[in-house]
Amino acid sequence: MTANYKNLINGKWTDSASGKTLKSVNPANTDEVIGTVPASIAKDVDEAVAAARKAYPGWRLLPAPKRGEILFRAAELLVKRKDELGRLVTREMGKVLPEGLGDVQEAIDMAYYMAGEGRRLSGETVPSELPSKDCKSVRVPIGVFALITPWNFPIAIPSWKLLPSIVSGNTVVFKPSSYTPVCATRLVEVLHEAGVPEGVVNLVHGTGDEIGEYLSTHRGVDGVSFTGSTAVGERLARICGGLEKEISCEMGGKNPIIVMDDARLDLAVEGALWAAFGTTGQRCTAASRLIVHEKVHDKFIDMLAAAAKKLKLGDGLKKETGVGPLINEAQMNKVLGYIETGRKEGARLLLGGKRRTEGELAKGFFIEPTIFTGVDPEMRIAREEIFGPVVAVLKAKDLTDAIGIANGAEYGLSSSIYTQDVNNTAIAERDLEAGIVYINAPTIGAEIQLPFGGTKKSGLGRKEAGGRGGALDMFTKWKVVYRDFSGRLQRAQIDKE
């Protein structure tokens, strides 16, 4: 029997005012329905925003360490349910089980980290230039946030937004992807069970077309945190800027791995394989461009093709599976379209390029790991985000040429270089136009204790995750306090004698 999940509004699990539902299916086997959720409309959003506004004054005044204790309890619950939730991620999103478990682990890490911020949320205290006066800056919450998340990390990315926003004292209306709504619901259930008061976290299911923009532009919403496509993010940023709302957008990528002639090729191949085909290439940080020094180009692509041939397509719950399905038919067709574009542009299809439908693959959205060589930097497959198991290999003459090719894309999220020369690493670290640079490691694998986000068309506004400049800067604003206890008028910059 199919499980039916609901919205959470003001602490109550409710159906949509529309009376309609959306179905979530397993992309590896579309006969398996994971669950149904409400197809929400504007009325549901209005009720959720009203609940968040009502809850905000009390939640804001709850001491931050108490808010952190709730997150700590949530972390403990996530630890206990890691295996169950990891399997759910694999069934609903399609990524292989080790990655599904990693998705949950990222939420666990974020919950513990942000729980600690409840006792930190640090500002600064500085000396005054005047006697009997002190000066400090403090973080204060902003209000009600709209949180909009994608399907590719259905528990991890919501945790990046939910946990820092509520530990900071904000209340939220959370709209997850309509392709992975069950994972989102189960995460919100954990927060509810951990003791988040009614109205602090509100969950509204639905499509982006129906309620995404309506929620983001709602007059009762003070800020928006969005992860998704560049086109949608840029549109929301323009609209919210006109409405004077805080907004942060984490968007697409066209991430390069540079392989120099002195690189350890075995390590570079292993990293490229993981970055290009992990999560079936459905990561904003996936390595979709490999920029290889001409002296090792031929050897590298031979090694890469041999390794990629060994990757087995299939259901991510099976131990032998190396690459799972695309999320849905539309995404599969988009990727197949790019593969055809690569052929027409004149790139050489070295490996893959086809949908697989034999046996158990017939009920899912499977595309072979695909490698193009002979790619020119101006080709669409070298410039546009594909979001699938497709990688373009480009040839470079030297480090300067490689960095120029890497920086030639409109995106600037993640980047990588493989080399044994410390001077090369220093130059790459300095000159690569990306929010994240990896040295002798692939373009995926960011850790939650540092900020996450990109430049150019990859990111707008504040960064995600932890560390200085991370999510707390998005979900708080600064207030500066001067207290004069001298008992007389003192004039800064004037009465300094």
Image: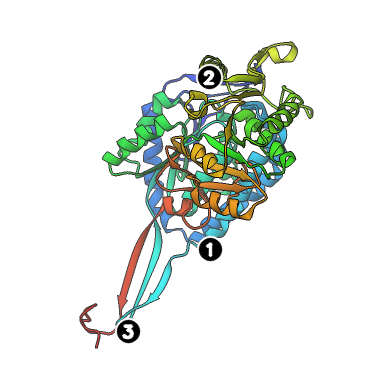
Residue 274 image offset from top left, x and y in percent: 67, 35
For the residue pair 311 and 132, the one nearer the viewer reads as: 311
Q: Amino acid at mark 1?
A: Arg
Residue assigned mark 2: 338
Residue assigned mark 1: 119
For this view, does 212 lie left or right of residue 177? left
Residue 34 image offset from top left, x and y in percent: 63, 23
Say which label, 3 or 2, has the lower sequence index.
Answer: 3
Q: Is residue 184 above or below residue 343?
A: below
Q: Residue at x 42, y 50 (%)?
A: 474
Q: SS for tag 3?
A: loop
Label disc, if present, on residue 159 of the rendered structure: none
For the residue pair 474 and 174, the one nearer the viewer reads as: 474
Asked which quadrant contains residue 388, the reply is top right
Residue 340 image offset from top left, x and y in percent: 55, 14
Q: Disc 1 to disc 3, how far (Cα)?
A: 28 Å
Residue 375 image offset from top left, x and y in percent: 55, 25
Asked which quadrant contains residue 292, the reply is top right
Say which label, 1 or 3, has the lower sequence index.
Answer: 1
Number of other residues with Cα within 10 Å of mark 1, as a class: few under 14, some 14 to 19, many 20 or more: some
Q: Disc 1 to disc 2, how far (Cα)?
A: 49 Å
Say which label, 1 or 2, has the lower sequence index.
Answer: 1
The answer to whether residue 1 is visible is no
For the residue pair 56 and 119, the one nearer the viewer reads as: 119
